[in-house]
Image (cartoon, rainbow, N blue to C red):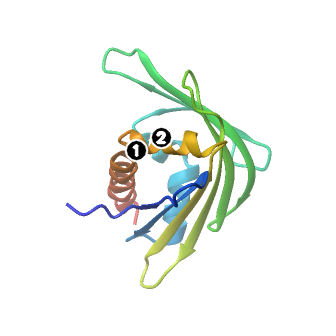
Amino acid sequence: MERKTKIHAEEGKQELFITREFDLPVELLFRAYIDPEIVEQWMGTRVLKLENKKHGSWQFETSDAQGNVVFQSGGAFHDIVPNQKIIRTFEMDNTPFAAQLEFLEFEKLMNGTSKLTMHIIFKSVADRDQLLQLPFAQGINMAHNRLEEVVMHLK
């Protein structure tokens, strides 16, 4: 099965680009990133905080079937322009990864479709390469598939 979410990581650089076209209007795609109820559905995580404003912060927590917390992440918003962009930091608790800087751009395409471009900057090339050794590409593709499935019902 082809992955609709594409990842481009140029050798020797501490950044990567993630792109995906969605069969969703840009307003719904953007909403999937700022509405706590929708985020919880497509990400399969609990939203502890989601302050969608400049200098706001966010915090998510994922638990296993027994209720044990297995993953926590959070960060700060640097800028949000509705239906256009989100600039934020992303930090995973209890991992060797340093904070990342993420630039999310939302683009309106034709006939109710849209495109998401994520530009992620890592502290080092080694950090980026270490993340890419994990099933990151498969995971983000699955998450984006779920996003589209969940938000499709809001159309």
Which amino acid type is shown beneath numbered disc 1? Phe
28 over 97 or under it: above or below: below
Seen at 57% across and 31% down, the residue is 73
The picture places residue 8, in percent across and down from the top left corner, at 47, 62
Secondary structure under badge 1?
A: helix
Q: Earlier in the sequence, mark 1 or mark 2?
A: 2
Q: Secondary structure at mark 2?
A: helix
Q: Which residue is mark 2?
A: 131
> Which of the two residues, 33 or 105, is positioned nearer the viewer here?
105
Determine the CA span between mark 1 and mark 2. 7 Å
The C terminus: image quadrant: bottom left
Q: Residue furthest bottom?
A: 110
**Residue 109 placement (x, y as % from top left):** 49, 81
Query: Of the residues shown, which amino acid type is indicated by label 2?
Result: Leu
The answer to which image quadrant residue 24 occupies is bottom left
Question: Which of the labelled discs sits on residue 36, or is there none?
Answer: none
Relative to 2, 42 lies left or right: right
- Residue visible at 33% across and 56% down? 145
Examine the image and state in which quarter residue 86 appears.
Answer: bottom right
The residue closer to the viewer here, 132 or 62, is 132
Q: Residues within 10 Å of mark 1 (few under 14, many from 20)?
A: few
Asked if residue 77 lies left or right of residue 146, the reply is right
The residue where tag 1 is placed is 136
Q: Residue at x 39, y 37 (%)?
A: 44
Q: Can the viewer see residue 58 in this picture?
A: no
Counting the numbered discs, the total is 2
- Image coordinates of residue 99 in percent, x first then y, are 66, 37
Callout 2: 10 Å neighbours few (<14), some, many (20+)? few
Q: Are marks 1 and 2 in contact (CB under 8 Å)?
A: yes
Outermost residue toward the front in this view: 12
